[in-house]
Image (cartoon, rainbow, N blue to C red):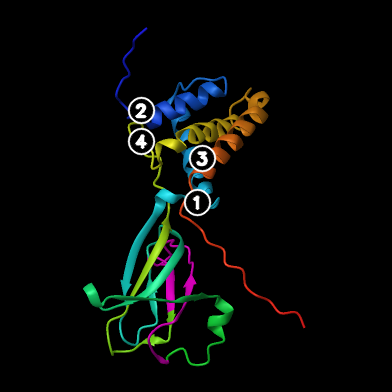
Amino acid sequence: MAYKTTDSTAFNLDLNEICEEAFERCGAELRSGYDLRTARRSLNLMLLDWASRGINMWTIEQGSITLSPGVISYNYPVDTVDFLDHVIRTGSGTTQTDINITRISESTYAMIPNKNATGRPIQVWIQRLSGATDAAGDVVYPQIHVWPSPDSSQTYTFVYWRLRRLQEAGNGINGQDIPFRFLPVLVSGLAYNLAKKIPGAEARLQMLKADYDEQWDLAATEDREKAAVRFVPRETFLR
């Protein structure tokens, strides 16, 4: 029997539909404004947890900071989870050159005797401050500290590839800041977290946790670099 497909690959769920599906998996129904509010809160907390689980490939972004002569410290965006790679760029166009800059620890940076020495920066300490607003109303920006301090011989640019924070769940009509392949794990995770709060859903907690773990493993295994990797053995000498 002949049939025709939809020719559509645009299926998605807005926040209301995600919460409805999660409630149904808990054996409950989304009935009130508070139900939606508590589900949205659980979803936002879960998205924050995802930032600590590893590299979410769709959140990798490139950015840059132009360095100024004699200036050591620079703010970077508060929604940065962490840096993956970074280089010092000089020149432009066909004369552009990217040179590696090594990330060092706080203790290594603290032991540098002359932090005001000038030259091409070759090391960077990334100070992961909270990004919160203090009592005076000032944002406590996370910072990079480069060494040596940039000299004035040319323009240096700190170019980085970062993991950014996932966007918030939003209101009822919003989609989520995830690729389609993570939609099943999003719903499974929300159902598991709601089951911790919904009276009578405790009996499903273990099943929902197992489903969430399985869906996460499937999605996270697919969401990875697939470039060729070459391992070169290093010759060792035993004496």
Identified by mark 3, the residue type is Ala
* Residue under pointer 4: 175
Which circle's residue, 2 or 1, is located before the other in the chain? 2
Give the alpha-carbon distance from disc 3 to disc 4, as whole Å: 18 Å
Give the alpha-carbon distance from disc 4 to disc 2, as whole Å: 11 Å
From the viewer's perspective, tell me whether residue 235 is left or right of residue 10: right
From the viewer's perspective, tell me whether residue 205 is left or right of residue 11: right
Identified by mark 4, the residue type is Gly
Q: Nearer the viewer, residue 138 or 44?
A: 44
Mark 2 Cα shell of 10 Å, populated few (<14), some (14-19), many (≥20): few
The stretch of residues the image draws in magenta is 117-145
* Residue under pointer 2: 11
Query: Majority secondary structure of the magenta segment?
Result: loop
The answer to whether the residue labelled 4 contacts the one labelled 2, judged by CB atoms less than 8 Å apart, is no
From the viewer's perspective, tell me whether residue 45 is left or right of residue 71: right
Identified by mark 2, the residue type is Phe
Which circle's residue, 1 or 3, is located before the other in the chain? 1
Residue 140 position by quadrant:
bottom left
Magenta run includes residue 135: yes
Which circle's residue, 1 or 4, is located before the other in the chain? 1
Magenta run includes residue 237: no
> Percent from the top left, x then y, of residue 162?
41, 61
The answer to whether the residue labelled 1 contacts the one labelled 4, judged by CB atoms less than 8 Å apart, is no
Q: Is residue 85 above or below residue 90?
A: above
